[in-house]
Image (cartoon, grey):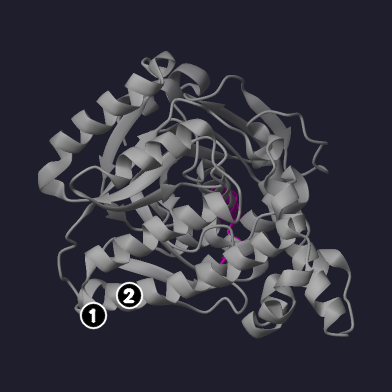
Amino acid sequence: MTDNLFTAYRTFFGKGDALYQLFAPYRICPLGAHVDHQHGLVTGFAFDSGIEFLFSATDTGKVEMASLSFEGLMTFNVQRPVDEKQGNWGDYLRGAVWALQQDFRLDRGVRGIVRGSMPIGGLSSSAALLCGFVMAIDKVNSLGLTRQQVIDYASAAERHYVGLNNGVLDQSCVVLCEADKLLFLDTATGEHRLIPFGGEEGKPLPFRLGIFFSGVTRKLTGTDYNLRVSECKTAAWIVQAYEGEHLKELQDTRLRDISAGQFARHADGMPERFARRARHFFTECERVTEGVRAWEDGDIARFGECVFGSCESSMDNYECGSPELIALYRIMRRTDGIYGGRFSGAGFKGACIALVDPSKEDSIRETVTREYLREYPQYRDTFEIFFCNPANGVEFL
């Protein structure tokens, strides 16, 4: 926690008593893109950049939160019903409180400062903010939430209040990850494993994480993200109809409800857009399984090829990726020292992520920057590259 966060707190609120410090990391998903909302198999890392919180309790229930990354002081009261969305970053704070109010009486609010350590786009900053704020409200109200409950309330806030129909991948990575392990999660059952590289505890990781910001920001609720979720559900519905199965409501249907064999029997008879969404789901779950085997074998090159394959399917079958992200991916694919990479997050704008050879970071930075800005010189002032390490999930400092 840096001194300027304390300085900002004193500037906004004075001295303050019983200050709490919390760090909620950003996350990447190397394998398992676009399948968590269909109850698929996913993997993830948290890493050592994210959102810092510095806060104290208020006995009146009032929330006063300022950000060094976004404009506006967000104020409301946890003792009262939460207002409608206001279209600003405070919606995530209000959503967290709204979700907790469904099961708890909240008496104490929080007063504090948050700061993100990277540009927003593709790293699940919303999940970091939500999980961190759920834990802040939990702390001052002594709710005693488990880590799984933090995931569940943060996810409910994003889906039912903010309005993004995502799964639990983002929140699970932010909360559950450990620095030297790969998170493997079955989003249908909630079962997860934290897997050491090469099957050996304490074995050093042979890579770092490269984060390549395209310079283009994006907001998921303004993209085709929710449309893709509906297309996946419709693909499952079509197969179930062909199979003569009882249909549930569309919002309760997932591609995990059908088998790969059932899809294969009916793929040619489906509208192509729906077949592509289902094809991505089933092949991505296969890549997750193969990637986990490579990880357990200590084969980072094979794991990386699975990550590259994930991005190819995201472009071809899931049909996401802005021109800028596609250009970045193509550059990464031909750059020496990058084991594997793909779009991060939903893949409509934002960033690309990669697993990189630490000894080649300088040449990677030079090559990717030169080639990307040759194609998109208009992003010279906003394009950025970071190299990071996997990290633990959200924790008090």
Q: Which residue is mark 2?
A: 195
Does residue 179 sit above or below 289 in this rendering?
above
Q: Is residue 145 magenta?
A: yes
Q: How far, Cα to Cα, is label 1 from label 2? A: 7 Å
Question: Where does label 1 land, which residue?
Answer: 199
- Name the spot of residue 293 as percent of width and height, x first: 33, 79
Which residue type carries mark 1? Answer: Gly
Looking at the picture, tell me which residue is in the foreground, 135 or 25: 25
Q: Amino acid at mark 2?
A: Ile
Classify mark 1: helix, strand or loop.
Answer: helix
In front of the other: 114 or 268: 268
The residue under the point 44% across, 71% down is 288
Q: Residue at x 66, y 83 (%)?
A: 259
Query: Which residue is at 43% across, 54% downward?
Result: 394
Q: Is residue 186 left or right of residue 366?
A: right
39 vs 150, nearest the viewer: 39
- Magenta highlight on residue 193: no
Residue 135, position as x, y percentages in the image = 54, 53
Q: Position of residue 285 (x, y in %)?
A: 52, 72
